Image (cartoon, rainbow, N blue to C red):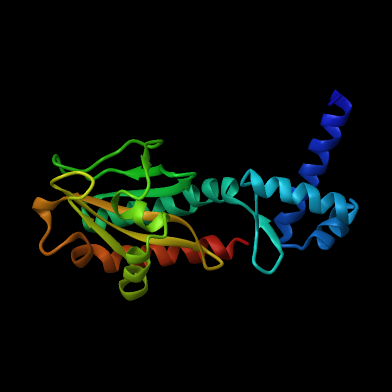
Amino acid sequence: MSETSSNRQLERISLILDALEFGDATASELARRTGLSTSTAHRLALSLVDYDFLRRESSGNYSLGRRFVRSRLEIIGLSYLTELRDKTGETIQLWIRRGDSRVCVVSIDSRHELKATLPVGATLALPHGSSGRLLSFEPDAMASVESHGWVESIGLRTPGLGSVSAPITQKEHIVASICLAMPLSRCEASPGADHGALLTTAARQISEAFNNQH
């Protein structure tokens, strides 16, 4: 592909991404907003879906995808996650799915000397841990979310540590999870029983704030 062709392709992609800042759109609406032909808009949109720049909804509409979701969630979620850490005293993390793994994109560490912690950028295989179970849509995890709003893991991934996670949603799609991780020695009952309600409230607040930006 020549440099001129590459630049033209990038220009078209930029037009589509800019058009979706005004809200979701079908391929024909993208064509109207960008001035591209419907076939070109549809072809480029499908390619962008493959690389997570766009999401295709069940309605056929296109919306900005996970690569944009992540950065906005980090900004929106930081204050909620910090407040949650301060209320619970435990480490709070924000996880997203990437292929068959989950990636930590925000981590607010507990101030306790004994704490559960992982650095930003840490990658763990699915479905291990409460966030792993949630982001892999494990049936038992989905049933727990339906019943309680959260899913927990007790000493399964790392002996002596437990966690509870709740989903972040975009238009009813789970796009991320927030996780509270703690030493089991500080549990009164279990991570979910102790902190699940606070975690679920924070997850709902982040989801609402994120969706209200669209």
Q: Quadrant of the N terminus?
A: top right
Residue extending farthest to the bottom is 147
- Find residue 131 and report its horizontal and vertical position in percent: 35, 53
Q: In this view, does 37 lie to the left or right of 101?
A: right
Along the line of sight, which residue is nearer the eye, 123 or 10? 123
Image mark count: 0
* Above/below status of 47 relative to 19: above
- Find residue 51 and report its horizontal and vertical position in percent: 63, 43
Q: In this view, does 102 lie to the left or right of 87?
A: right
Residue extending farthest to the top is 3
Residue at 38% x, 67% y is 142
Q: In which quarter of the image is the C terminus?
A: bottom right
- Find residue 146 and report its horizontal and vertical position in percent: 37, 73
Residue at 84% x, 62% y is 28
Residue at 40% x, 53% y is 79
- Find residue 185 and report its horizontal and vertical position in percent: 8, 51
Asked which quadrant contains residue 4, the reply is top right
Residue at 18% x, 43% y is 115
Q: In this view, does 160 lie to the left or right of 24?
A: left
